[in-house]
Image (tube, rainbow, N blue to C red):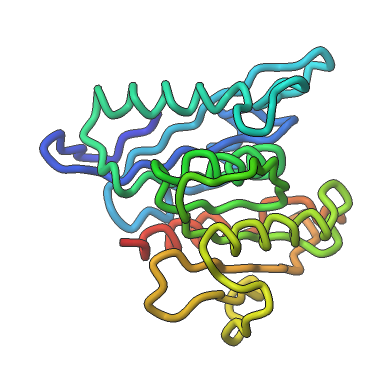
């Protein structure tokens, strides 16, 4: 957990819960995401740690879990309750961030716990979507069309699932592209817009081809998007 400098227990703070992927733990993704640097207001950040499976990789669910209740949805519930008991949190501004497997979990939680989550920002994730979602959730989805670990067709499935969850039409005309080639679905005054961002950043800082990465500047983009949600 990371508290903002000068945390005021009398003031409700936004809460960002950030989920790591399959191979890197919560300590690594805190440095990797660089969310705190982009915070526009005092914000509480939590970086949960997933359990390892038999192969030694991290997981946020069990293979036998039904879609409507992945194992670590209960971790989210307990974590949120614990943070709310100990800190002054704005319950209307709880946000989820994730990359890769963590993105898939965050996207799934956005459906399962939409009544507790205001917005979600994910990169390179899929979704395990139950039949019914709790409530609409604003979303910003980044995905590289050349991603070899999570296919573009899965990313489009996530986009369409969240469009449906938010009552937006997949065939509607989004506005002009912006940073990360993002296109916004929903009118300017939409309470729960969706930003769909098929970005093209597929080289690491060292020049290695890796289209499944967390793009440079994504942390700032995440915090800018989330800060804009009232």
Residue closest to the far left: 10
User: In the rendering, at what x and y percent does residue 153 appear?
Assistant: 83, 59
- Residue 98 sits above or below residue 75 on the image: below
Q: Nearer the viewer, residue 130 or 15?
A: 130
Give the total of numbered labels: 0
- Residue 28 sits above or below residue 85 on the image: below
Image quarter where the N terminus lies is top left
Asked which quadrant contains residue 68, the reply is top right
User: In the rendering, at what x and y percent does residue 95 appear?
Assistant: 43, 46
Asked which quadrant contains residue 227, the reply is bottom left
Please give left or right for residue 222 compared with residue 66 in the image.
Answer: left
Asked which quadrant contains residue 162, the reply is bottom right
- Residue 44 sits above or below residue 59 on the image: below
Please give left or right for residue 149 compared with residue 129 in the image.
Answer: right
Residue drawn at x 68%, y 62% is 160
Image quarter where the C terminus lies is bottom left
Residue drawn at x 86%, y 62% is 146
- Residue 174 sits above or below residue 41 on the image: below
Q: Nearer the viewer, residue 37 or 148?
A: 148
User: In the rendering, at what x and y percent does residue 63 appear?
Assistant: 77, 22
Residue closest to the far top: 54
Q: Nearer the viewer, residue 66 or 142?
A: 66
Please give left or right for residue 214 compared with residue 133 in the image.
Answer: right
Residue drawn at x 32%, y 27% is 83
User: In the rendering, at what x and y percent does residue 143 appear?
Assistant: 72, 60
């Amino acid at each position: 957990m990371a508290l903002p400098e000068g945390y005021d227990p009398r003031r409700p703070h936004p809460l960002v819960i950030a989920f790591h992927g399959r191979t890197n733990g919560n300590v690594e993704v805190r440095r990797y995401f660089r969310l705190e640097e982009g915070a526009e207001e005092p914000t509480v950040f939590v970086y949960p740690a997933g359990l390892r499976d038999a192969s030694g990789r991290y997981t946020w669910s069990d293979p036998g879990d039904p879609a409507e209740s992945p194992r670590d949805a209960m971790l989210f519930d307990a974590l949120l309750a614990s943070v709310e008991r100990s800190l002054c949190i704005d319950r209307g501004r709880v946000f989820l961030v994730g990359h890769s497997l963590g993105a898939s979990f965050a996207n799934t939680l956005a459906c399962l716990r939409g009544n507790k989550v205001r917005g979600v920002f994910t990169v390179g994730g899929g979704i395990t979507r139950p039949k019914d979602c709790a409530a609409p959730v604003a979303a910003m989805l980044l995905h590289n069309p050349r991603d070899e670990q999570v296919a573009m067709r899965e990313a489009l499935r996530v986009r369409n699932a969240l469009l449906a969850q938010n009552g937006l039409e997949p065939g509607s005309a989004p506005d002009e592209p912006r940073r990360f080639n993002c296109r916004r679905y929903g009118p300017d005054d939409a309470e729960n817009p969706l930003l769909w961002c098929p970005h093209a950043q597929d080289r690491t800082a060292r020049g290695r081809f890796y289209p499944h990465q967390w793009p440079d500047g994504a942390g700032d983009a995440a915090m800018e998007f989330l800060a804009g949600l009232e």
